[in-house]
Amino acid sequence: MVMDTQPKRVAILIEQGVEDAEFQLPYNALKKAGAEVVVLGSRVNEEYKGKQGKLNIKADATTTESIATDFDAVIIPGGHAPDKMRTNLKTVQFVEDALENGVLVASVCHGPQVLIEGDMLDGVRATGFRAIRKDMQNAGAEFVDEPLVIDDNLITSRRPGDLPIFVTAILQQLNLNIPDTTLPPVSDMDAGWWKLGEEWGGSSRSEIVQALNTAIQGERYSLETFQHYSDNATDDAMKELFQEILQHKQQHIQQLEARLGLFNETPSLPAAVSNLYASVKSFFQNDQTDVEILRRALGDLQTGVVDTYNLRNKLTDPATVEIFDRMEVTLARDEQRIANLYKDRLGDRTPGSPKPSSRPATTGA
């Protein structure tokens, strides 16, 4: 029997604003595994820059002259890039040719926008970034909210936090191995995926620890703040809701601290937090109406939702990101409940904008 000694050829699509990690992790891992990686863009005389400013690369070729069946796999990273890719008819046709001819197609985050454009999701089990869930369903997909979904020769994942699992699935489907690296089963959610993420250019241990500490700081501050809100509210419905939110905060802190403990770290609180506590206490030195308390509570929850969303999208550690994801959902629901109560208590008065007592802890890109 003649052995196939040719390296696997993998195309990674590129456009401006690609999510850096979603390009870099598969690119680096495939290179380590000995694959021939070809970067395909819309033109070769342009430097493509990543959404986070970490990536700067030129394409090796374009999708116009490339032949899909010359490759063993095609990867579609996310970020802002897929929205540009889908306007390039040659790119959409290239991916469609790959999928129809049994070439492995792997798409992450906003990558399925290219599949939507080519009507490639009808009747297919797939996943993607939560913001395009409805778009995928409208295109006929059976949307599955899981880190990894494999349907025939299509692999999809949801976000940067799924990348170590996503890339491992690609390597395993291509029968590729990396020297001195053990690839866990993709079904093992308890594997130390963050280590593979770090090895392939994703978030480092220190970045994960910092993100966990940031979240713990925010929830500890919120815990004390909402205790003040509960103590000073005169409305029974408000008190009951604040107590439920306090329980959520306590649960979040326990989950975050448990995750931090797995890195043999303890929470680190900056001195600046004490200034925030002083601000809350100062607010209650004068009698405050229930409406004003609700207004501040609404602002604090909005800050928490956005901070958690941004933290979730910065990391390539599936376990930590899963905690942030559950937190974001809970915070958003609590925000809506506070908003409903605030509007109800206003009566005929014009609502004022939220007035958070906290500051943003992180920003999006």
Image: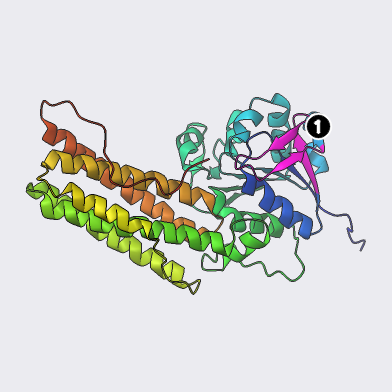
* 42 lies left or right of 185: right
At x 51% / y 36%, what residue is drawn? Answer: 136
For label 1, the SS is: loop
Read off the magenta span. 37-60
The x and y percentages for residue 23 are 67, 46
Indicate the amino acid at tag 1: Val
The x and y percentages for residue 243 are 18, 56
* Residue closer to the observer: 262 or 158: 262
- The N terminus, quarter of image: bottom right
At x 20% / y 37%, what residue is drawn? Answer: 340
The x and y percentages for residue 120 are 61, 34
* Residue closer to the observer: 225 or 254: 225
Residue furthest out toward the right: 2
Q: Can residue 300 be seen?
A: yes
For disc 1, the neighbor class at 10 Å (few under 14, some 14 to 19, many from 20) is some
Identify the residue under disc 1: 44
The x and y percentages for residue 274 are 31, 58
Residue furthest out toward the bottom: 264
> Is residue 40 magenta-colored?
yes
- Compared with residue 175, is residue 109 higher up or lower down, i.e. above or below? above
